[in-house]
Image (tube, rainbow, N blue to C red):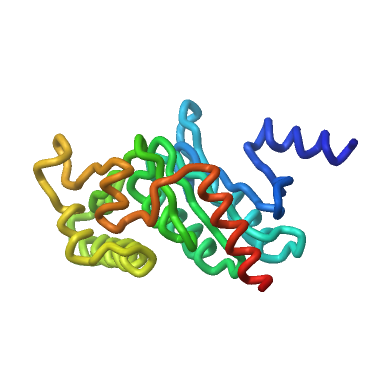
């Protein structure tokens, strides 16, 4: 009873489901609002803190009772380095992983979505592809531009390596000037994201869990 009360409290307070109780125990990780990295967001904004996420991913990899990972995304983006760090950890997990984009998977949320073994998106969700932005003071020097270019290459390379979209197509969508008002980039809905090869499948919780169950059972052989 004590364990059940603890699980319920963690679900209500932290949005954390340690282990689902279906055919196989799955850890559910939610990424919502802005991904917070080295600097805190304002108090009015929902955030996902990378220092909370990273220990969860280590636990998923190490806990023998956890057989798979489900990532649920509804994010506006956020800190690029923090987002890439989380995405790299997800990609490195050796257990079956699946992601679902609900609502939005914008900006650095795109690498997070494609980092899973199989990515899903609901038809009504949207994803915004745009160049890396920098907030705060920026020195207008060649070194600064080279640094921003190198970050962009890391993001683009990760997305291309972990999805079915080509670098040329992703770059074209990222640099489009006729889609977003006062900004470069492209906004796509769920079906377009799948059509363009950015996301693997249309689907929601049922399809994602069924994929994880099948992968777990396949690997057990």
Image coordinates of residue 165 in percent, x first then y, are: 27, 62
Q: Is residue 63 above or below residue 136?
A: below
Quadrant where the N terminus sits is top right
Quadrant where the C terminus sits is bottom right
Residue at the outermost left position:
178
Q: Is residue 20 above or below residue 167?
A: above
- Which residue lies at the image location 38% right of the left edge and 56% below the top edge? 200
Residue at the outermost top position:
44
Residue 168 visible in the snapshot? yes
Relative to the observer, which residue lies in front, 194 or 109?
Answer: 194
Left or right of 6? Residue 97 is: left
Image coordinates of residue 183 in percent, x first then y, are: 17, 41
Image coordinates of residue 28 in percent, x first then y, are: 62, 47
Relative to the observer, which residue lies in front, 100 or 46?
Answer: 100
- Which residue lies at the image location 65% right of the left edge and 65% below the top edge? 217
Image coordinates of residue 152 in percent, x first then y, are: 28, 61
Residue 147 visible in the snapshot? no
Left or right of 200? Residue 46 is: right
Q: Is residue 103 above or below residue 216?
A: above
């Amino acid at each position: 009873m004590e364990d059940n009360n603890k699980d319920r409290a963690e679900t209500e307070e932290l949005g954390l489901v340690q282990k689902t109780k279906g055919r196989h125990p799955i850890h559910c990780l939610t990424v919502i609002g802005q991904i917070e990295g080295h600097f805190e967001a304002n108090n009015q904004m929902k955030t996902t803190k990378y220092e909370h996420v990273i220990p969860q991913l280590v636990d998923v990899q190490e806990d023998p009772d956890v057989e798979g990972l489900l990532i649920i995304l509804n994010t506006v983006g956020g800190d690029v380095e923090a987002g890439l760090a989380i995405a790299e950890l997800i990609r490195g997990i050796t257990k079956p992983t699946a992601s679902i984009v609900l609502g939005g998977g914008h900006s650095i949320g795109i690498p997070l979505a494609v980092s899973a073994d199989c990515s899903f998106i609901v038809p009504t969700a949207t994803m915004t592809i745009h160049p890396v932005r920098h907030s705060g003071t920026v020195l207008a020097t060649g070194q600064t531009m080279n640094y921003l270019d190198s970050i962009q290459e890391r993001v683009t390379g990760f997305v291309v390596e972990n999805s079915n979209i080509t670098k040329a197509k992703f770059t074209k969508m990222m640099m489009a000037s006729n889609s977003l008002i006062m900004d470069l980039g492209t906004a796509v809905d769920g079906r377009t994201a799948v059509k363009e090869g950015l996301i693997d499948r249309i689907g929601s919780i049922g399809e994602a869990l069924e994929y994880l169950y099948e992968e777990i059972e396949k690997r057990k052989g």
